[in-house]
C-alpha cells in the first residue's frame, strides 16, 4: 500500500487514519482507515459536495477505465490499486497504480508504459464519445514530462543519442542550438504520439470490456484492484450457446427405416441381413 512513501508520508498516513478511526468511534486503526488515509495522502480527501452531472460522470468513468485498461494490458505497467469516479483534490476521478516494492531504477519500457497509461483516458473519450475534453490536461503534461526526460536526461532517444540536453540551473539558458532544440521537440512529440497510438489501439481492441466496466463503475463509483481483475476475467470466459435439441418423430423414424429397407432390396451385393442402419443427418 505504501511503496515510494517517505517518512513524512507515512506519518501523515497514520495521522489521517487515526482521525478517521476516532470519527468512527473505533479504539484501533483498521484496514479501512488505512486505505482511505493512503488515498487522502496521494490524492486528497473526497469532495462529494462537488456537483457532477450524469453526462460528466459518464465521461469521467470511461476516462478512468481507459487508464486502468491500458495499465492492465501492458506487461511493464504497475498493478492498478483503485479506480474511482469520486472527486478528490483537484481531480474529478482517480486511477491509482502502486508498485509491488520500492524501486530505484526505471527501464525505458516502463517509462513507455507510464506514458501509454497516461494517454488511456483521452483515447477512451475519443473512442466512446467521438470528442475529447479538458480532463486529460494533467495526463498530457505527465506524458510530455516523461518523454522530455527520456530525450534530454536519460539518453533514450535513438535520434539524439547519449547526450544530456537540459538547463544547468534555474537561471541558465539552454546550452544547445536551436536546431537541436527542434530535434528535441520532434523526439518528444514522436514518443507521446506513439504512447497515444498504443493506448488507442488497446482501448479500441477491448472496447466491449471498456464499456462494461465503465458502466459498472458509474454504479459502484469505486473499484479496487481485485474487483477489476474479476471484471477482466469475465472478458475471457467464452459464451456457451445452447442449441435446441431436435427430437425425431415416430413417423419420421418409420419413413427413414422404410427408405433404408428399399435401398437394401435394390442394392447389388448387399451383405447386411440385420436391422437397417439409421440415416446420417447432415449438419
Image (spheres, rainbow, N blue to C red):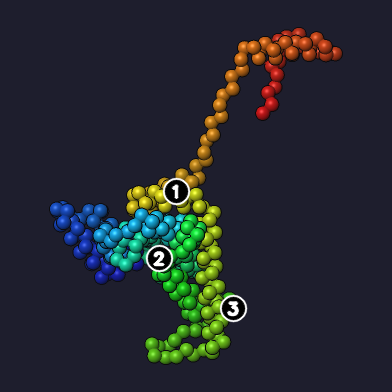
For the point 74% across and 13% down, the residue is 259
Viewed as shown, does residue 272 lie left or right of 43?
right
Where is residue 201 drawn, in percent x and y? 54, 59
| CB within 8 Å, label 1 to label 3 | no
Residue 241, x across and y down, in percent: 54, 34
Tell me the quadrant of the picture where the C terminus can be found.
top right
Instruction: Give the class, few, some or many, for how many residues have Cα within 10 Å of label 2's Cα (few <14, many ≥20).
Output: some
Q: Nearer the viewer, residue 15 or 183?
A: 183
Q: How much space separates mark 1 and mark 3, taking CA atoms?
A: 41 Å
Q: Position of residue 77 (x, y in %)?
A: 46, 61
Q: For numbered disc 3, what is the local secondary structure?
A: loop
Q: Nearer the viewer, mark 3 or mark 2?
A: 2
Residue drawn where x is 25% and y is 70% of the image:
8
- State which quarter of the image contains the N terminus: bottom left
User: Is any part of residue 170 visible from this angle?
Assistant: yes
Residue receiving disc 3: 159
Residue that mark 2 sits on: 135
Q: Is residue 180 left or right of residue 222?
A: right
Q: Secondary structure at mark 1?
A: helix
113 with respect to 45 (left or right):
right
Residue with the most extreme right position: 268
Q: Nearer the viewer, mark 1 or mark 3?
A: 1
Q: Which residue is mark 1?
A: 212
Mark 2 or 1, nearer chain start: 2
Q: Residue at x 55, y 68 (%)?
A: 194
Crowding around mark 1 (Cα neighbors within 10 Å: few <14, some 14 to 19, many 20+) is some
Is 4 or 169 nearer to us in this picture?
Answer: 169
In 3D space, how far apart are the residues under numbered discs 2 and 1 (Cα atoms)? 21 Å
Residue 270: image location, x then y, percent = 81, 13
Q: Is residue 11 above or below residue 59?
A: below
Amino acid at each position: 500500500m505504501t511503496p515510494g512513501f517517505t517518512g513524512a508520508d507515512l506519518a501523515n498516513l497514520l495521522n489521517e487514519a487515526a482521525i478517521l478511526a476516532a470519527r468512527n468511534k473505533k479504539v484501533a486503526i483498521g484496514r479501512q482507515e488505512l486505505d482511505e488515509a493512503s488515498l487522502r495522502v496521494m490524492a486528497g480527501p473526497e469532495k462529494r459536495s462537488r456537483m457532477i452531472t450524469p453526462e460528466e460522470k459518464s465521461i469521467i468513468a470511461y476516462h478512468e477505465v481507459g487508464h486502468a485498461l491500458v495499465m492492465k494490458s501492458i506487461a511493464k505497467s504497475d498493478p492498478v490499486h483503485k479506480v474511482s469516479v469520486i472527486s478528490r483534490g483537484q481531480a474529478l476521478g482517480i486511477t491509482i497504480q502502486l508498485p509491488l516494492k520500492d524501486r530505484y531504477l526505471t527501464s525505458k519500457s516502463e517509462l513507455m508504459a507510464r506514458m501509454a497509461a497516461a494517454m488511456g483516458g483521452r483515447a477512451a473519450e475519443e473512442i466512446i464519445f467521438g470528442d475529447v475534453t479538458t480532463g486529460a490536461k494533467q495526463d498530457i503534461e505527465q506524458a510530455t514530462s516523461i518523454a522530455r526526460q527520456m530525450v534530454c536526461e536519460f539518453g533514450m532517444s535513438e535520434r539524439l543519442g547519449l547526450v544530456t540536453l537540459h538547463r544547468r540551473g534555474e537561471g541558465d539558458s539552454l546550452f544547445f542550438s536551436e536546431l537541436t532544440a527542434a530535434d528535441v521537440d520532434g523526439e518528444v512529440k514522436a514518443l507521446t504520439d506513439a504512447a497515444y497510438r498504443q493506448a488507442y489501439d488497446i482501448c479500441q481492441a477491448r472496447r466491449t470490456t471498456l464499456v462494461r466496466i465503465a458502466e459498472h463503475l458509474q454504479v459502484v463509483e469505486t473499484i479496487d484492484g481485485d474487483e477489476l481483475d474479476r471484471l477482466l476475467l469475465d472478458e475471457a470466459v467464452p459464451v456457451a450457446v445452447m442449441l435446441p435439441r431436435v427430437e425425431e418423430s415416430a413417423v419420421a423414424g418409420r419413413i427413414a427405416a422404410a427408405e433404408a429397407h428399399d435401398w437394401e432390396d435394390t442394392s447389388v451385393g448387399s451383405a447386411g441381413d440385420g436391422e437397417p442402419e439409421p440415416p446420417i443427418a447432415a449438419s
